Amino acid sequence: MTAKPKARKHFLFLLTILLLISSSFASAGSESAADKASAAQLRAIQEYIKQSWHTLTRSSAELAKAAPDPKFKPMADGRWPVYISRRENIELIQQRLRAQMSAKDFATIDIRQLPTDVTDVEQHGLLYLPYPYVVPGGRFNEMYGWDSYFTQVGLVRDNEMVLAKNMVDNFLYQIDHYGKILNANRTYYLSRSQPPFLTQMILNVYRKERNIRWLRATVPAIEKYYRFWIEEPHLTKQTGLSRYYDFGNGPAPEVLSGERDDKGRDHYDHVKEYYRTHDVKDYDLSTYYDKQKDQLTDLFYKGDRSMRESGFDPSNRFGPFSVDIIHYDPVCLNSLLYLMETDTAEILRILGRVREARLWTTRAAERRQKINELMWDKQDGLYYDYNFARKEVRRYPFATTFYPLWVGVADKSQAARIVANLNVFERPGGLLTSTIVTGSQWDAPFGWAPTEMIAIQGLRRYGYNKEADRITANFLSLILKEFIQHNTIVEKYDVERRESEVSAGLKFGYKSNEIGFGWTNAAFTELYAQLPQREQQNVLKLAGLKVPKEKSE
């Protein structure tokens, strides 16, 4: 009788040991699984991106969804204004919209003709566009200038060619009806544009569809938009290069309405507090802030608006809050204008207009020479922005140093110097936008899809594929890791901590991390496709790849 209890006790002991062992193996297995994404999880993010092109699409038939602006409130009666260009017949547009929309949806909007003087707009609203377009997501429920380029790259990669062409046709319409490609299609954006990627978008469509007739029709808009950038006030006569410059005055309406903290303070309140408590050496503070009156000057608002035309809003790239941008020729803008010149030459050659193409090639060569003469810093081995008032570069390491690589302005030795400085920017989650923590979203420790894509593709252009593969794997694995945790994709990431939670580090501008998100979706799709197949598995490594601490050789 005593043997059976002993045997039973022995059995229970062995069972306990086995359970503990199996538990430890399961624990180890779960840790391993946590460090590496599955093929199913990769497919999930890819499917999310493909679906997002349609969930983020807006059109005239869906104005009830396109007109609402998260940055503003509707009119007193609950409707949202939609403005029609003065070059359009408003009655015909209304008839067309009534035919496309349900009566219930049409009742949520108020169709208005845009006034001759756009400063007469009292109730800000959506600007009508004839074709469907993709919005970034979150608080950005309109078609943005430079966002749309990156989004279109993703659309082309996913073979969404109808939408990809619609995006270009909307920009051509904007140039014709609103004078330029807008920051976005809201009335408060009529005074400025955004970084110019138009010719790249045109070529992205042409290379797929080979429609010569359509390509020929784009040339007048290209020429008109080019003049916008190379004539005053965007032209700086001292250098022959261009700058960002907003035509409007006073505070940006979207900031006053949509960028307030929980105490009701807007971005400008935080700026004044900063000026009261800091000794600013980067520029003459008195030109931007009246200390006795505790007021921001008219020139501050001009600089603030112009900084928003750059797309990098805000950072300290041009001094605190980048308001001194109006005194700089930025390396990003002039690199993009070089690309516009070379692209236009290519388009004209395709059309058989060889003599005209030579003029654009000459313009590009002249701009390239000026960029390298004024913006390349031999000492640091980086490209910087040029202060034409002081006749010097501002040594502020920023991700725009990779733009000359992306467009082909740099020579091989300059590219090698920049690659030798990769450790300045490279972090566990990709590349920093800048190296300095300021509390602004376009500075450290944040990384953004557009600058990651441009830098990576710039590295590939000069043959630095090993570095490009590593940065790609680390940025995309960060996006994938956060997607697995939160089931969404966002506009920016903390590349130091490899996290999408960023609000704690933001002091200026809006503090949110918007969901969607157009250009991040596109970057994931495009950069993953550009990885060699053997390197794509590294994207599944959720802890990322090891980042070299030493300078690249």
Image: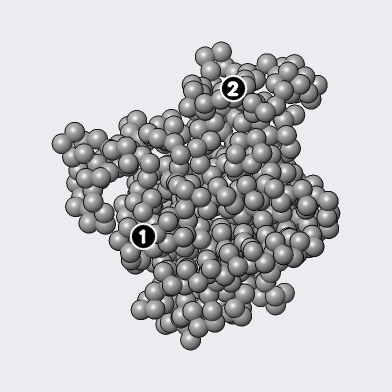
In the rendered image, residue 82, in percent from the top left (x then y), is placed at: 62, 25
Q: Quadrant of residue 455?
A: bottom right
193 displayed left or right of 106: left
Residue position marked by numbered label 2 in the rendering: 80
Q: Residue furthest front?
A: 355
Alpha carbon distance from label 1 to label 2: 43 Å
Q: Earlier in the sequence, mark 1 or mark 2?
A: 2
Residue 446 located left or right of residue 81: left
Q: Residues within 10 Å of mark 2 (few under 14, many from 20)?
A: many
| Residue 337 in view here | yes
Instruction: Residue type at mark 1: give it.
Output: Phe
Mark 2 secondary-structure assignment: strand
Q: Tag on residue 131?
A: none
**Measured along the vertical axis of the image, is residue 198 above or below residue 535?**
above
Q: Which mark is residue 388?
A: 1
Q: Position of residue 430 (x, y in %)?
A: 51, 66
Mark 2 and mark 1 in contact (Cβ < 8 Å)?
Answer: no
Q: Is 110 rendered above or below residue 480?
A: above
Is 303 or 78 nearer to us in this picture? 303
Q: Residue at x 72, y 23 (%)?
A: 89
What residue sits 65% from the left and 35% below the top? 177
* Residue depicted at 40% across the width and 35% down the height: 249
User: Which residue is located at x 45 percent, y 47 percent?
Assistant: 233
Q: How many marks overall?
A: 2
Residue 21 is at least partly visible in this image: no
